[in-house]
Amino acid sequence: MWPLDPSRKEVLRFAVSCRVLTLVLQALFNAFIPDHHAEAFSPPRLAPSGSVDQLVEGSARSIPKPLVQLAVDKGYRIAEGNEPPWCSWELPLIYSYIQDVYWNVGFLRYYELKQVPNFLLAAPVAILVTWGTWTYVTTHPWLCLTLGMRRNKSDETLEKPDPGFLSPRVFVYLVHAAALLLFGSLCMHVQVLTRFLGSSTPIVYWFPAYLLQHQEPLLRSLETVPWKPLAEDSPPGQKVPRNSIMGLLYNWKTCSRVTRCILGYFLTYWLLGLLLHCNFLPWT
């Protein structure tokens, strides 16, 4: 195994220590502070003598009738009742059962007319990934057809590969992003695509940055002349801010349509998401 950097060792040791401490505390709390409400719905337990008729306190037969009626009304599973189907599976996976029965997650199950607002919510990030995939494939068709295993003869003569988003090294990330988009669009709740892709692939951020660099003249002028006014009629003493994004926002009216769409989407999503999610309103 390769040697780790001392700083990484400290971070790893701290993470493992925190995890072990959490597990120990959880075990202690479960041992000294049992959940009696959960035990009320647990299967019958035998007394120390082993007799079936002698049930210890807290078993199914000691559940008060109002509590049993509440469980029936709420649809809870109680002892000596019908077991859920996943218990009899060869590989009992409760998560897939919950997705199928309670969340209605499956192939094309979410394609309903009432879900159109959720599709609109996920449309921008889906368009970004699709656009990025199309741009990369049309730029490097031979690289994509050969899955990156063979290069074109013209590429072999180049001393350095294309930098940035169109680099051959980005191909694996692009395939990963396209696969996640395809799976999420067909088999998931579509409104979670934004956080699903935003936390799983860097393409969501690399491609907008590529668009800003190549389709925004103002950004190129900010990079070449970072501390001078952009126009001759600028007020005296006005300087271009060090942050390029702030420079684009200050000159919003002169930005291209692509720049306005990208900045408007990310800023709007950040602001509305911050306000709605913190107030427990539906936003993803």
Image (cartoon, grey):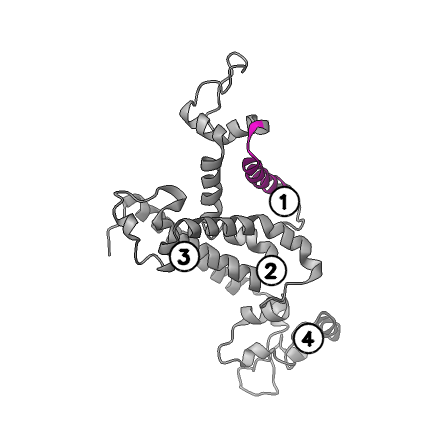
Q: Residue at x 47, y 48 (%)?
A: 132
- Of the residues tagged 1 and 2, which is closer to the observer? 2
Upstream in the sequence, badge 2 or badge 4?
Answer: 4
Q: Which residues are magenta?
A: 254-273
Upstream in the sequence, badge 4 or badge 3?
Answer: 3
Question: Label 1 sits on what residue type?
Answer: Cys
Give the residue number, with chain letter if any, for mark 1.
Answer: 278
Question: SS at mark 2?
Answer: loop
Q: State the CA–CA distance, disc 3 to disc 1.
A: 31 Å
Question: Where is 150 relative to 230, above or below?
Answer: below
Find residue 70 and report its horizontal and vertical position in percent: 73, 70
Question: Label 2 sits on what residue type?
Answer: His
Question: SS at mark 1?
Answer: helix
Q: Residue 25: in sight, yes or no?
A: no
Q: Residue at x 75, y 72 (%)?
A: 66
Give the residue number, with chain letter if any, for mark 4.
Answer: 63
- Of the residues tagged 4 and 3, which is closer to the observer? 3
Tell me: 147 left or right of 219.
left
Question: Label 3 sits on what residue type?
Answer: Val
Tell me: 254 left or right of 21.
right
In this view, the residue in front, 26 or 267, is: 267
Upstream in the sequence, badge 3 or badge 2?
Answer: 3
Query: How many residues crowd mark 3 within 10 Å: few (<14), some (14–19), many (20+)?
Result: few
Q: Residue at x 52, y 11 (%)?
A: 236
- Of the residues tagged 1 and 4, which is closer to the observer? 1
Q: Are marks 3 and 2 in contact (CB under 8 Å)?
A: no
